[in-house]
Image: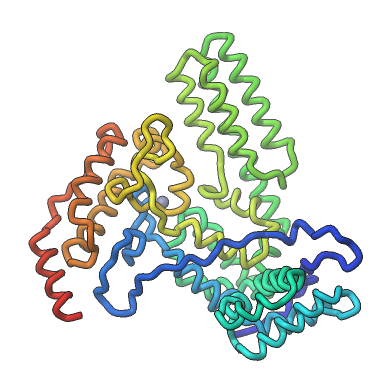
Amino acid sequence: MKIQVNNYIFPNIFPNKNSTRRNTTACITFQKLSSDTVSFKAKQKPIYDLRLIPDITCACCGVTTIQNREIDSFMEKEIYFPANEAIKIIEASGVFNKKKLTDSQYEAYKFCKLLSKLYENQTLSNILDREAVREKLQTLPKDVRVNIKDIELMTKRVYHNSKYMVDAMSKFEQRMNKSEKEVFQILKENAQRYPEQSFTEIFNNPSIYTVNLKKIELEQGKILWEADQIAEKLNPKSKRKVHSMLVNAYNILIKEDASVKNKRTRIIQTFDNAEKLIPEKELYQEIKDKINQLPSSKNNASAFIVKYRDNNPNEIAKRLLIGSASTIEHVKPQKRINDPGENDIKNYIVLCSNCNSERAQIPYDEFIKLHKDMPQNAQKYFDTVIKYINNGQLQGYDKYPHQIKKAVEKESAGKIILDYSKLNLIEAEKNRKYMEKNK
Ligand SMILES: [Zn+2]
């Protein structure tokens, strides 16, 4: 593994020795590692969770999903540095200078340093998760433990250059979502030109950042203008209302600083909230559909670059993968007021993480307008599930095909009709018995 000593000042997240206030930017919480129990080491092991089907595709956009544990294991083994190397790099940046540290910070550093020597070539997170280490941690004073957590975060921020990163990540390229793939393409091209730059530096390269910011602004302007054209057909009072909301949206998007987050969500909310005030339901729905097309970091490469340009290279890498993570979606949304969907297999479908968060509670017959290929992709997903039921591997799902066919048909108002004629439960039973015998 090639180590690059970071060529920018390493971000020190220890609170200042002389101040009692903790540095809030340091308190980033990282997603907990997911713990799955099923292993694919042996061929033909039973699968109980739809997300763990190896080649499962998103029922909406059709991308072949990436499992969360694949992402976690990739980050642990190939992106984050082992503790011994990470600590050396942080030492070189001067963060661990004894004069700058409080006693408990220094004690935390010494403890981590010792661990990094005891358990070579493992990340600090992995080491701290060992049972023996966890027991030892309990005997340390609380402020030392807090400082150890800070050091753990620091080690996760030590990064490789872009050349290393694109090489390591290229095995996931085919499974990245459309816009993430586009971003990865940009990173790949630039890693060739500037191999020593980091992902963050590439995003902030003026020729990339400015160009992409301009691209989004053009796209946003176009969408607002088109929404305004639809609003022309409303009665004068509704037209005035929608027009002023569009001007407000324009101010949020173009005039507010580019670093302000969640602008799109705020705008969509304003339009949702005003629904009661506009009597022309169909036209207003058209306007809302238009507003939903505003670029987001989940469906637009430029928006991704602008949103994540301040993030650490390792977080950018994780973001590029996590959009395709396989997640369980409730066909009939659980949070639907008055008529919530059940939290049960018969209401489950697999979507990639991006489609899942985009869908939220939109009924499928609405959602389908944004994803015209959904009927074909839902069938492709269904075929894979049926294949695994037939080969006896997917257990407890014999009734699933006809249950989910019914649920999807209802939720999509008949726009998605699934075909389960390939389901063969006799073959499934035969294969299960065979697997049982050869265990
Ligand atoms: Zn998807």
Q: Position of residue 389 (x, y in %)?
A: 20, 61
| Residue 169, visible in the rendered structure | yes
Residue at screen point 14% across, 79% down: 437
Residue at screen point 60% across, 50% down: 302
**Quarter residue 250 falls in:** top right
Residue at screen point 79% across, 80% down: 107
Left or right, 291 with reference to 336? right
- Number of residue marks: 0
Between 24 and 252, which is closer to the camera in this rendering? 24
**Quarter residue 66 falls in:** bottom left
Q: How is the image coloured?
A: rainbow
| Residue 368, visible in the rendered structure | no
Image quadrant for the N terminus? Answer: bottom right
**Quarter residue 87 falls in:** bottom right
Up/down of 32 relative to 401, above or below: below
Up/down of 327 relative to 133, above or below: above
Q: Position of residue 359 (x, y in %)?
A: 44, 42
Left or right, 79 with reference to 250? left
Image quadrant for the C terminus? Answer: bottom left
Residue at screen point 67% across, 73% down: 152
Q: Residue furthest front?
A: 139
Q: Position of residue 50 (x, y in %)?
A: 32, 59
Between 159 and 132, which is closer to the camera in this rendering? 132
Up/down of 411 relative to 67, above or below: above
Q: Position of residue 420 (x, y in %)?
A: 17, 50
Left or right, 320 with reference to 377? right
